[in-house]
Image (cartoon, rainbow, N blue to C red):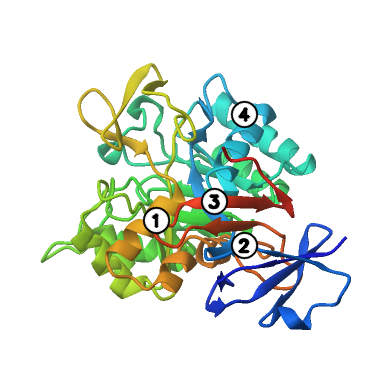
Amino acid sequence: MAEALRCKMVFDGTALHDGACVVIDGGRITALLPDPAALPKDITLTDLGEGILTPGFVDVQVNGGGGVMLGGDHTGIDTIARICAAHARLGATAILTTLITDTPQATAQVIAAGIAAAKARIPGFLGLHLEGPHLDPRRAGAHDPRLIRPMSAADLTFLEQAARALPALMVTLAPEAASPNQIARLRQAGSIVALGHTDCTADQARAAFHAGASGVTHLFNAMSQLQGREAGLVGAALDSDAHIGLIADGIHITDTSLRLALRLKGKSRAFLVSDAMACAGTDMTGFSLNGRRIRRRNGALRLGDGTLAGADLALPQAVAHCVGLGLPLEQALALATSRPAAFINATQHGRLAPGQRADLVLLCRDKLTPQQIWQGGAELAIR
């Protein structure tokens, strides 16, 4: 039965509307009406009050949540479902579950689980993001350098097959570990290729973009930096049409760097990611990653030597951080909804428009924290 939700402010993925209402039927949006008076009499109208109603957030870099990481001993469909459910309660109703550098066996198991999750229609599952193992060990970050390796012909064939079987496959790689021809073949197979964990030159980055890489994973982190006589991946990304993912937690990148990136790319080619780990949605004080202890403290996740290991962040917090830096609200919300959805071609997500899935988040207007969340038209219990 159709129902309608009215809110003081409604964000459709691009623009804000005052006092509009969203009509939902059968788990999908059927209309966005500027005036509730236009509703048919048989549709129940619920007034949500003074908040901001937005599309469900879309997160393309989610390593874990609900107490588990994807990988290691947790490579099955149950782990994917648990991570998706944890992030839906945080506002990200559609995600790419992400496997950081792991063994070939674990990678194969995760891909098999991803294919099964897609067939089972696990709520919130958009596909997989493989962040590694084809990276540069000089920029390993929290990835296990023992497991990092160049892409082989067998790896390429395996990834091509996975891309054709999954609803979406994002692959983060370093140009030093994969040739332009391999990147081109991944793109032709349907993968979304992003550059990251690399010490490449700007010329190497440009060659990878020309071959088909379309994004950069967590810009500024674990990559070659912009310098006067060598622009690195950061400079090449900012001087290109590549999409950039940003971890806006005030820890991974300075506010100055974040403002600069948003000034150059924020109107069309930037999006926010959480880079969340196992502790997302829990009170955990730490967890283990490839036998190494990760500590959760002061809003950050770190290895014993201080290396950042993912982020203690949810996308609504990242949006609020951007707004606090002066970014207009509609631009900040787009960074977590329509922009990441467009990057991975998730056409049913990130916007409030007829035919879209009825994934919605009601935010309070002052702190931008989620108050109510709907996934496929069903309200979730978030407290």
Question: Which of the numbered marks, if any, corresponds to residue 367?
Answer: 1
Tell whether label 3 touches label 4 (CB within 8 Å): no
- Residue under pointer 4: 79
Does dot 1 land on a helix, a strand or a loop? loop
Q: Earlier in the sequence, mark 2 or mark 4?
A: 2
Distance from Cα at disc 1 to Cα at disc 4 = 31 Å
Tell whether label 1 touches label 3 (CB within 8 Å): no
In the picture provided, is 131 more to the left or to the right than 256? right
Indicate the amino acid at tag 2: Leu
Please name the residue shown 32% across and 69% down the image.
262
The residue mark sitting in front, 1 or 4, is 1
Distance from Cα at disc 4 to Cα at disc 3 = 26 Å
Height in image: 311 above or below 82?
below
Quarter of image, res 358: bottom right
- Residue under pointer 3: 371
Q: Earlier in the sequence, mark 2 or mark 1?
A: 2
- Residue under pointer 2: 48
**In this orientation, does residue 168 appear?**
no
